[in-house]
Every structure is written in structure tokens, then in C-alpha cells.
Amino acid sequence: MNNKILRPPYNDFSTWIHEVFPDRKVQKISVDAGFTCPNRDGTLGRGGCTYCDNRTFNPDYCRERRTIAEQLEAGKRFFGKKYPEMKYLAYFQAYTNTYATMDELRRKYEEALSVPDVVGLVIGTRPDCMPDELLDYLSHLSVFVLVEYGIESTDDRTLCRINRGHTYAQTADAIRRTAERRLPVGGHVILGLPGETRENLIEQAERLSELPLSVLKIHQLQLIRGTRMAEEYARHPEDFYLFGLDDYINTVIDYLEHLNPDFIIERFVSQSPPELLIAPDWGLKNYQFTARLLRRMNERGTWQGRLLTK
């Protein structure tokens, strides 16, 4: 019998985070700390990434102007109703959360860590906004710190088309420099960006597998009202391939088969508010999608990394 078939089909985030915090439940609380991005403020460009609207992932308690501590306390009240003993990770999520002076960054992170029951940080950022000085500071904090980079694609042509303002070489460099300091490194990618084929995505999975990533988020492309990409889609819908549900499930499995089996997979889909979402709309919650994915993986008898060639 092939023992590999008996292993879990992919490394899931909930198991990993329980191993990191074996004696407590932890929950991320999103924080909008008032940052911007270098491709929004004119440093690299204007308008931001063509697909991006931060309203799609900012919860209600982030939308009013509140201090970092106030946002975290509001999040604690929301999540603590079910689990009063819960501990929390402050998730600096909106825009580029390392894009400021060191003094300002220290102040914001330390405000979050001063909130009772906050036991760590998750910091979302761009790979071109991570100086060594900041990595050194983060590596010496006595709490859990996960640095999460927006990778989106490994193809520089795609990165240019979606106005990311950085190259894949910068992504690889930032991930390596972060891992060298023994910080867990997260990343997220978008499947279905215009111009990328299934073959391109398989190449992407193989290429990412060479990096010292800890955690990966996989998202489907979503068209969001008011974004530049939505305008592009209205003008040239032929440039876009929007996944159907079954097609996306099979594409994710193909992707996983070529992905480093040590990577922790945090999620497979993103959910945007229905009033903002143009397409695709599958009508599924994250856990419902994951259940279908697992069923299909079992039907195919496959697992993460099965076809990885490097």
C-alpha cells in the first residue's frame, strides 16, 4: 500500500496554529492602522493594484476611525462571546502595514501588543516595503509574529499589468530575508489573473515551492465594483477567465499537487461583500468550499506535493 495516500491531503492552517499555541484558542482580529501603499501615494504609482478594494476584507469594527486598541477591544467583544478564554493575534491587514518610519511602526505594533490577551502580530505587507531594520526589530519581539506578503503572481508581466509596482525577484528576496531571521513567512496568491493559464499556475506553484514560505493563502480572482479591473472587464471581458466552481476546485487541486508539501495552506477562497462583488459568486462559505475540495481530493486520490518536480 502507498502510505502517502494515508497522509492528510494538505497541510491545514488550523492544525499548524494549534501546534504553535497548543494550550489556547487564538483568533486573528483585523486592524486598520491607517497605512497607505507606495503605489497609491505616488511613490511608485497611483490608484493601487487594479483588483484592490480594502472594503472587501475590513470588518465593521475597522470602518469607523478608531485607535488600534479600540479596534482590538471591539474585535475581542465580538469573538469573546463564544470563547471567553480566547487569545488574539492583531492582524495588520489593510494596505501596506510596514510602510512608515520605524518610530511609527514600533508605536503601532506596541499599541496592539499592549492590549490584554493579544499574544502576537500578523503583519500584511508588500515585498518591496520590508527593510532589514524592521525585520531585525520583529525578530527580537518576544511574541509570535507572522509576516504576510502579497505575492499574487510569480510572473513579472502579470505584476505589471495589475499595477503591483514590484517584481517577483523582490518577492523572493523579501521572503528569504524574513525566513533567515526565523520568522514565519506567509504569502497570498490570486488564481485567475488576466493572461495566466492553467499551465502558468502550475509553473507558479513549482516556482513558489523553492521559497522558504511557511503559510500560503490561495484566492480566486474576484471582480469588485469600483476597481480598475472591473472597468477593464467591462471594456474587454474576453481578456478574463472567471472560474466556475468545479473548474476552480480542480485547478486548486492541480496547484496543490505541484506545491511544496511543507507549506501550510490557510485558505482557498476569498469572500467579498455581495454588494461589492461582480463575479464569480458561488454562494458558498469558506468551510463549504473546503469540504467540496477535500471530497474531490479524496476522489482523485491525491495530496499536496504529489506531482512536485523540483
Image (spheres, rainbow, N blue to C red):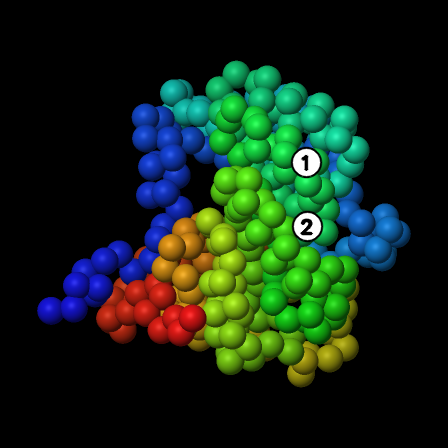
Task: Give me the residue at 60% from left, 39% from top.
Answer: 123
- Residue 112 seen anywhere in this rendered image of the structure: yes
Dot 1: few (<14), some (14–19), or many (≥20) neighbours within 10 Å?
some
Alpha carbons under labels 1 and 2: distance apart: 13 Å
Above or below residue 109? Residue 270 is: below
**Where is residue 292 shown, x and y percent of the image?**
33, 62
Front-most of residues 232 and 8? 8
Count of picture labels: 2
Q: Residue furthest bottom?
A: 238
- Residue 76 seen anywhere in this rendered image of the structure: no
Amino acid marked by disc 2:
Arg
Determine whether the residue tagged by mark 2 lies in a helix, strand or loop.
loop
* Rendered image quadrant of residue 50: bottom right
Which quadrant does the N terminus fall into? bottom left
Task: Give me the residue at 65% from left, 74% from top.
Answer: 194
Dot 2: few (<14), some (14–19), or many (≥20) neighbours within 10 Å?
many
Which quadrant does the C terminus fall into? bottom left
Determine whether the residue tagged by mark 1 lies in a helix, strand or loop.
helix
Task: Give me the residue at 33% from left, 43% from top.
Answer: 15
Which of the numbered marks, if any, corresponds to residue 293?
Answer: none
Question: Where is mark 1, residue-wise?
Answer: 134
Front-most of residues 262 and 200? 262
The numbered mark, 1 or 2, whose residue comes first in the sequence reads: 2
- Callout in the foreground (1, 2): 1
Amino acid marked by disc 1:
Leu
* Rendered image quadrant of residue 72: top right
Question: Where is mark 2, residue-wise?
Answer: 126
Task: Give me the residue at 38% from left, 55% from top.
Answer: 262
Front-most of residues 231 and 151? 151
